[in-house]
Amino acid sequence: MAQQRIVITGVGLAAPNGDNLPEFRSALLEGRSGVSMIETRYMPPVPAGVCNFDQFKHQSKKASRRGTRAGAISIYCANEAVADAGYDMKSNRADRVGVFIGITEHGNVETENEVHNISQYNYDVKFWTHHHNPRTVANNPAGEVTLNMGITGPHLCLGAACAAGNIGLIYGVQMLRLDEVDMAIAGGVSESIHTFGIFASFQSQNALASHEDPTKASRPFDRDRNGIVVAEGGALYVLERLDDAIARGAKIYGEIAGYAYNSDASDFVLPNPTRQAECMKLALSRAKMKPSDIDILNTHGTGTGQGDQNECEAIREVFDGCYRLSINNTKSFIGHSMGAAGALELAGNLPSFDDGYVHPTINLDNIDPKCDLPNLVLDKPRHLGQVDAIINNSFGMLGINSVVIVKRFVK
Amino acid sequence: MTLEGIKDAVVEIIQDIIPDEDLSAIDEDKPLREQVDLDSMDFLDIVMELRKRYSIEVPEKDYMELNTLNSTVNYLLPKMESL
């Protein structure tokens, strides 16, 4: 049976260097980093990707106070995506809209805040907030979106480590194909810069980036990289079946051509290039594409030695000899936006279908010889002319790999 | 604290909980929930803030005393007048 074609008709995002797609795209083409130094508990200042969107554009102060940062990011992105799609929530059935949001983790921020709160009261738990449970349930970010927008269809968050942004998107595609929903708000979010535990754990793992200039701290594939820059952010898409999108005259950003996700089954933290390559090949096979059909590959590369090298090994295995391919890295601009990463980095690349450019990888001054892929785009954007297909890698701890391929929409 | 002082303290707490609302025209004898967007979780916030700011406990059986601004202030007077 032929599968329903699923298209992207709206994009809402919060990035450390842009509050919407045009701003984000300009920053990526102009080489503007979104990384700055922030204070976190118990540690010296750390470089991080911090968003500056207007939290109260779509959310009341009361709801914001009661909810979470991940909820606020989700609400902002969802409203922006629906507005961008020109999707009229009033004239469409609220029970046929679904919200599917990938998250790396949820609840760390809120729990740490509450432990800090009761530490001010000699750890007396009668000062522990009654908001703790609704803030920390795993569906919180997606649930906050449904409350804010009056959506009565299904919602959930998909816990998938740093592969989650792609997986939120994939789940939206699947729910549309199952006819469970008519429109999916899908992608990923991250509030991770607000938990010291993430920074401290990466530091104990010798995987936390540091640099005197925070804008140079995120440097995947560079010999002098020293770890991950954690970022907050989000990207949510409006996804629809092609027939529905055409019927309402929607603008179409691109078509989800293929996807895959799989498991390494080999280590808690170390990535497995064989499984990553298998994941890319499966996505290509489902898209009915050859590696040589892909124009742009957005790497997952986080700026850790083994992670970068293993991904490059996997890319070589799949794309060896594909000289048309251009390879970039979006984390070099914004850091690693965890649960948002896959969705946000894909968003940064989507405008390539219109402007014909591929944004570069920045901060790559001395390439690690093991990461010296022939098609890496360095420092400056490259003009490709027509871009037909983008492949987007997103991998996470416990060995979870996700790959999404988006192609230029052709009727 | 005086009655006025207690009223100011309660209004300040409520304003922090519902920052979007204008409390200047509140009818002090009408139920708060009929005038502003306060739900049961917000009332628990009022109880928590009284505990944090003034070390006052409001047991569950007394929650109905927080119905109007005046009933709240009258209920709190014996607990707060010595503060």
Image (cartoon, rainbow, N blue to C red):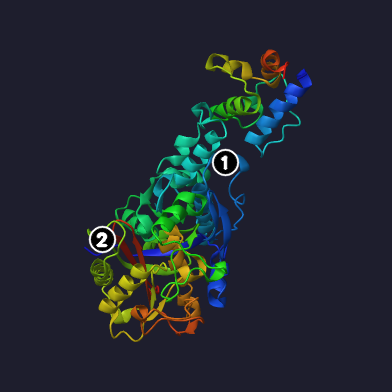
Q: Secondary structure at mark 1?
A: helix
The relative height of residue A111 versus residue B40 in the rendered view (above or below) is below
Front tag of 2 and 1? 2
Say which of A147 and A269 sits in front: A269
User: In percent of the image, x 76 and y 23: which residue is there?
Assistant: B5
Left or right: A91 as drawn, with respect to B9: left
Chain at tag 1: A
Q: Is residue A90 visible?
A: no
Pick whichever of labels 2 and 1 is earlier in the sequence: 1
The relative height of residue A175 versus residue A211 in the rendered view (above or below) is above
* Crowd class of label 1 (few under 14; some 14 to 19; many from 20; radius 10 Å): some
* Crowd class of label 2 (few under 14; some 14 to 19; many from 20; radius 10 Å): some
Say which of A103 and A34 sits in front: A34
Q: Is residue A404 visible?
A: yes
User: In percent of the image, x 49 and y 59: which residue is there?
Assistant: A231
Q: Position of residue A239 (x, y in %)?
A: 41, 59
Q: Position of residue A113 (x, y in %)?
A: 52, 41
Disc 1 marks a residue whose amino acid type is: Ala
Residue for badge 1: A63
User: In percent of the image, x 44 and y 41: which residue is there?
Assistant: A136
Q: Secondary structure at mark 2?
A: strand
Disc 2 marks a residue whose amino acid type is: Asn
Quarter of the figure that contains the N terminus of chain A: bottom left
Residue for badge 2: A262
The relative height of residue A101 versus residue A270 in the rendered view (above or below) is above
Quarter of the figure that contains the C terminus of chain A: bottom left
Say which of A400 and A181 sits in front: A400
Chain at tag 2: A
- Give me the C-alpha separation between circle 2 and circle 1: 37 Å
The relative height of residue A279 versus residue A107 in the rendered view (above or below) is below
Q: Position of residue A318 (x, y in %)?
A: 26, 77
Left or right: A222 as drawn, with respect to A264: right
